[in-house]
């Protein structure tokens, strides 16, 4: 029996959602492995991978395993890796001087990857947190009870030159000191590294979602807790306009790529930055965002793959060109299996 109730509608948007191929034709956003950067943790020695408890599926790797991992990631179509060293406690000091050791772990890792898998983009953080006993990103001024901005920047610029000499493609200052991008650009250029790019952690918020990462690199342990207060340098999560100021400064100082971090809870900031600048934009889906999805999936409360893919899609839709995500490899592996279907 024909239904007599009929709406007179000028538009019926559901028409274009009726079949898979119609939906595919109308799809506005996509995530591909080439958009992704896999963060990786590297450790000294030749031991087997050391699983990171608060980040299921992630482990600290020896340099040898790291190189193998980069080969696999590249074969899966992943564009880049971001390296984070986990130093043993005896290498850490209050002034983080190990960061300037020309043979320090992360520099050996860069050289090894660039020798074996030169096509993959290698990125390293510029910040002192893996190297300092206190776990802060810069030099601690006990009198001021704060980081010493300019002295830290001087060190970061030296770290940048060392990383560039080791063959890194992009250096990523993650410290949030004032003026660091300009100083790093000048130091790189002075040493003939005009081709080394700067991916600036421009809008990096003082987020509680970094907890698992601090376990992974051991930067939380000296404080005896997950929580290390970085609010004198990282942004207040309440502040939008201040984030845009930071972004504008990094662009003016010569950043090649801007970044918003974390990603999921800051989609509005990603969108605003996208509209303010023509530069490539990165977003970092941080350790806590990863841990949330993994934990709920382990309990059977969320569908891992679908939530993972949706979280990445949302970050792209907000306006990010590239995403640093711990899901990079797993995403690329299922992408390869399922062909292009999204
Ligand atoms: C260190 C750094 C952090 C992250 C990347 N670089 C932690 C912090 O600022 O305390 C966080 C990454 C993550 O949580 O996945 N400067």
Image: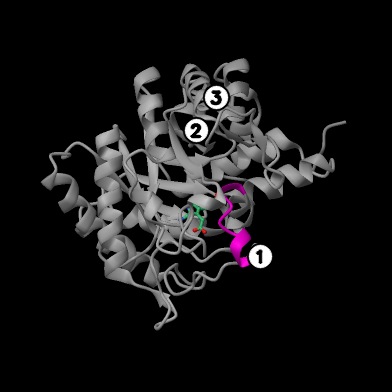
Residue at 49 percent across and 69 percent down: it is 230
Query: To which quarter of the image does residue 211 belong?
Result: bottom right
The Cα–Cα distance between marks 3 and 1, rounded to whole angstroms, is 30 Å
Q: How far across and down, in percent of the image, does residue 64 sit? A: 51, 23
**Could you say whether the residue bearing mark 2 is in a helix, strand or loop?**
loop
Query: Is label 2's Cβ within 8 Å of ligand 1?
Result: no
Residue at 34 percent across and 45 percent down: it is 101
Q: How far across and down, in percent of the image, does residue 322 sit? A: 42, 39
Q: Which image quadrant: the N terminus?
A: top right
Query: In this view, which residue lies farthest toward the bottom?
Result: 143
* Side of 287 relative to 291 (left or right): left
Query: To which quarter of the image does residue 294 belong?
Result: top right
Residue on which disc 3 sits: 65
* Side of 308 relative to 98 (left or right): right
Residue on which disc 1 sits: 224
Mark nearer the N terminus (2 vs 3): 2
Disc on res. 30: 2
Disc on res. 276: none
Residue at 68 percent across and 40 percent down: it is 307
Magenta span has 23? no
Asked if residue 6 is positioned above or below residue 138 in the image, the reply reads above
Q: Which residues are magenta?
A: 216-223
User: Which marked residue is nearer to the observer: mark 2 or mark 3?
Assistant: 3
Asked if residue 70 is positioned above or below residue 127 in the image, the reply reads above
**Could you say whether the residue bearing mark 1 is in a helix, strand or loop?**
loop
Query: To which quarter of the image does residue 58 belong?
Result: top right
Asked if residue 314 is positioned above or below residue 44 in the image, the reply reads below
Residue at 72 percent across and 36 percent down: it is 304
Q: How far across and down, in percent of the image, does residue 54 sit? A: 70, 47
Residues 91 and 61: in front is 91
Q: Which image quadrant: the C terminus?
A: top right
Residues 269 and 46: in front is 46
């Amino acid at each position: 029996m024909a239904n007599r109730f009929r709406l007179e509608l000028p538009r019926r948007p559901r028409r274009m959602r009726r079949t898979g191929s119609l939906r595919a034709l109308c799809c506005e956003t996509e995530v591909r492995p080439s958009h992704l950067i896999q963060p990786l943790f590297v450790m000294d020695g030749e031991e087997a991978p050391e699983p990171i408890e608060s980040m299921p599926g992630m482990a600290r790797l020896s340099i040898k395993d790291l190189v193998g991992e980069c080969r696999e990631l590249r074969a899966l179509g992943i564009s880049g890796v971001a390296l984070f060293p986990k130093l043993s406690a005896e290498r850490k000091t209050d002034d983080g001087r190990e960061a300037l050791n020309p043979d320090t772990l992360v520099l050996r890792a860069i050289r090894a990857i660039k020798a074996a898998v030169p096509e993959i983009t290698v990125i390293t953080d510029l910040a002192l947190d893996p190297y300092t006993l206190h776990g802060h990103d810069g030099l601690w001024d006990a009198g001021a009870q704060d980081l010493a901005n300019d002295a830290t920047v001087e060190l970061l610029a030296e770290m940048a030159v060392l990383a560039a000499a080791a063959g890194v493609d992009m250096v990523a200052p993650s410290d949030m000191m004032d003026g660091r991008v300009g100083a790093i650009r000048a130091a790189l250029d002075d040493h003939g590294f005009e081709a080394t790019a700067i991916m600036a952690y421009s809008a990096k918020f003082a987020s509680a979602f970094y907890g698992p990462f601090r376990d992974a690199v051991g930067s939380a342990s000296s404080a005896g807790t997950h929580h290390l207060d970085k609010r004198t340098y990282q942004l207040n999560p309440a502040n939008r306009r201040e984030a845009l100021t930071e972004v504008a400064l990094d662009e003016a100082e010569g950043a090649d790529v801007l970044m918003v971090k974390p990603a999921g809870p800051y989609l509005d900031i990603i969108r605003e930055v996208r509209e303010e600048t023509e530069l490539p934009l990165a977003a970092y889906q941080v350790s806590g965002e990863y841990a949330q999805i993994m934990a709920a999936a382990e309990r059977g409360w969320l569908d891992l793959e679908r939530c993972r893919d949706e979280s990445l899609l949302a970050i792209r839709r907000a306006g990010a060109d590239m995403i640093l995500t711990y899901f990079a490899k797993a995403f690329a592996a299922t992408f390869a299996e399922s062909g292009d279907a999204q």
